Amino acid sequence: SRIGGVSVHGWKTFAFMVRETDSSMPFGDDTDTVYVLKKDQSANYRKCIIGFQGSDGASDLANFIFRAKDPTDYCGRSGVHTGVKNELWRITHDSQYANVIVPALETCHEVTCVGHSLGGSLCNLFTMCANHGLESLRGSNNGRMWDDYNSLIWETPS
């Protein structure tokens, strides 16, 4: 199993996506993997973990380094690292995220985000948007930032 040792603690792979870009991208191709693990605490309560893959090649490194000087806005916040924002934007605007990851998250009562390296940065931005995006966007008419929020969020079970 790709989830290794966590399975002995009751976690199961629930959903995953693999987003690949072709080698026509500068610095080569890029693969982004997102997993959702679940652990049912009871018949009426599910904990989930969403995990983002870390850097996997020159494309991620180049995007991170060359975009560091160009902060941008995302989900109602300014000063966001452009490379990290672009990576998360590509993931959350992929049809696999909408068709596989969001429906899985909609069954979760509690969601924890994990990631290493770039995956950790993606988690930071993901949790900022999921937890504070709506309050950061109140009163805003910035359609792009509302799109950021709407593409990432999910409905939680009651």
Image (cartoon, grey):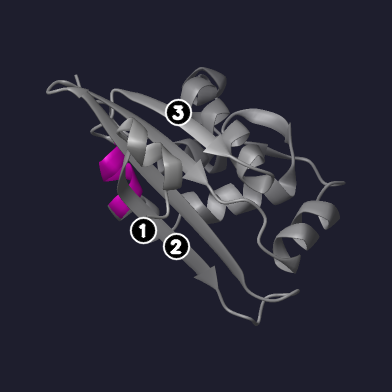
Dots 2, 3 in contact, CB < 8 A: no
Residue 35 visible in rendering:
yes
Q: Earlier in the sequence, mark 2 or mark 1?
A: 2
Residue at 74% in and 75% down: 26
Dots 3, 1 in contact, CB < 8 A: no
Percent position (x, y) of residue 53?
56, 51
Q: Earlier in the sequence, mark 3 or mark 1?
A: 1
- Residue toward you, 88 or 52: 52
**Amino acid marked by disc 3:** Thr
Residue highlighted by disc 3: 112
Give the magenta range: 100-105
Can you tell which of label 3 and label 1 is closer to the viewer? 3
Which class describes the residues within 10 Å of circle 3: few (<14), some (14-19), or many (20+)? few
Residue highlighted by disc 1: 96
Instruction: Find residue 81 and name its label.
Output: none
Percent position (x, y) of residue 108?
28, 29
**Amino acid marked by disc 2:** Val
Residue at 46% in and 51% down: 34
Q: Where, by quadrant of the figure, is residue 73 drawn?
A: top right
Helix, strand or loop at mark 1:
helix
**Amino acid marked by disc 1:** Gln
Q: Earlier in the sequence, mark 2 or mark 3?
A: 2
Instruction: Find residue 18 and name its label.
Output: 2
Residue at 57% in and 27% down: 128
- Residue toward you, 138 or 34: 34
